């Protein structure tokens, strides 16, 4: 049976902020990602092993390659992980930019028997549902954290970089809080993409803003297209 774990409540957020990078806003952990369980996925209390165990992280080094061996390594990391951070839209949450979900039966099957922490970095950062679609401009998620690229709305080119970075920090804080060394995220998203993202309207190899931060912290990010 899959267990859906409640994302961080405000009370727990105070404790988790100590683990967020020093450049993060000190109130970044006070928002909550969507917490309603997806249809067909039962809810459960926080597992007893949810406290951080950072010594495990070295065994889950980031893997951004798209070769067969790299993909197999990501799948194996997912199979071995007791707790997984998951894009909430893949669980059936209607939290995409267009107000829809991307419920995936393959994802639900892969998560059978695991504790699941649902996240939607963009909704958690307060960008709303629905919201204008956003593309990366000037590079990928790695370039955003290096200050070389931005996250801009597709039509009006409004800058949403700070909100996307806040959502990424929230996701990292949840991963640390619940010791989730593996994340299963939605491909092509400017936040969650791990192999391909839209940059200036063109789908190109690269990773989103949340994925880049999770990988920098030593966590394995698995694409829903890996399954």
Image (cartoon, rainbow, N blue to C red):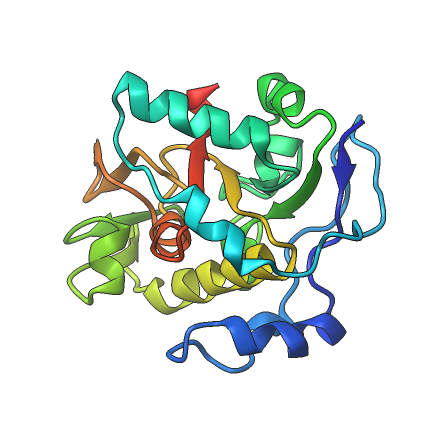
* In-image side of 56 versus 160 (left or right): right
Q: How many marks?
A: 0
Q: Nearer the viewer, residue 176 or 120?
A: 176
Nearest the camera: 85 or 155? 85
Q: Position of residue 61 (x, y in %)?
A: 37, 44
Residue 40 position by quadrant? top right
Name the quadrant containing residue 176: bottom right
Whether residue 100 is visible here, answered yes or no, is no
Q: x%, y% of residue 175?
A: 56, 55
Position of residue 129 measured from the top left corner of the image (x, y, whole percent)? 58, 50
| Above or below 168: residue 41 | above
Residue at 33% across / 64% down in the picture?
161
Quadrant location, the N terminus: top right
Query: Which residue is at 49% across, 44% downward?
Result: 97
**On screen, 82 above or below 216?**
above
Residue occupying the point 22% across, 39% down: 201
Residue 131 picture location, percent across and down: 49, 51
Residue 98 appears in the picture as rendered: yes
Q: Describe residue 70's horizontal placement relative to residue 4 as left or right.
A: left
Q: Seen in the image, is 223 located left or right of residue 110? A: left
Above-or-below relation of 66 to 6: above
Q: Residue at x 25, y 21 (%)?
A: 67
């Amino acid at each position: 049976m899959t267990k859906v774990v409640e994302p961080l409540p405000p009370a727990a957020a105070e404790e988790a902020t100590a683990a967020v990078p020093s450049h993060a806003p000190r109130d970044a952990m006070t928002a909550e990602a969507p917490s309603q369980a997806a249809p067909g996925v039962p809810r459960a209390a926080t597992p007893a092993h949810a406290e951080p165990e950072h010594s495990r992280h070295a065994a889950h080094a980031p893997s951004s390659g798209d070769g067969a061996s790299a993909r197999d390594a990501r799948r194996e990391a997912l199979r071995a992980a007791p707790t997984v951070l998951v894009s909430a839209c893949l669980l059936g949450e209607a939290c995409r930019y267009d107000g829809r979900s991307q419920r995936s039966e393959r994802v639900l099957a892969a998560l059978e028997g695991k504790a699941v922490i649902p996240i939607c970095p963009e909704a958690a950062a307060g960008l709303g549902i629905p919201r204008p679609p956003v593309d990366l401009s000037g590079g990928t998620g790695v370039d955003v954290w290096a200050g070389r690229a931005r996250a801009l709305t597709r039509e009006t080119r409004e800058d949403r970089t700070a909100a996307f970075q806040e959502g990424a920090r929230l996701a990292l804080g949840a991963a640390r809080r619940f010791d989730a060394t593996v994340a299963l995220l939605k491909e092509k998203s400017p936040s969650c993409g791990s192999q391909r993202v839209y940059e200036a309207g063109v789908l190109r190899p690269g990773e989103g803003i949340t994925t880049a931060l999770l990988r920098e912290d030593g966590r394995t990010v698995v694409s829903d297209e890996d399954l």
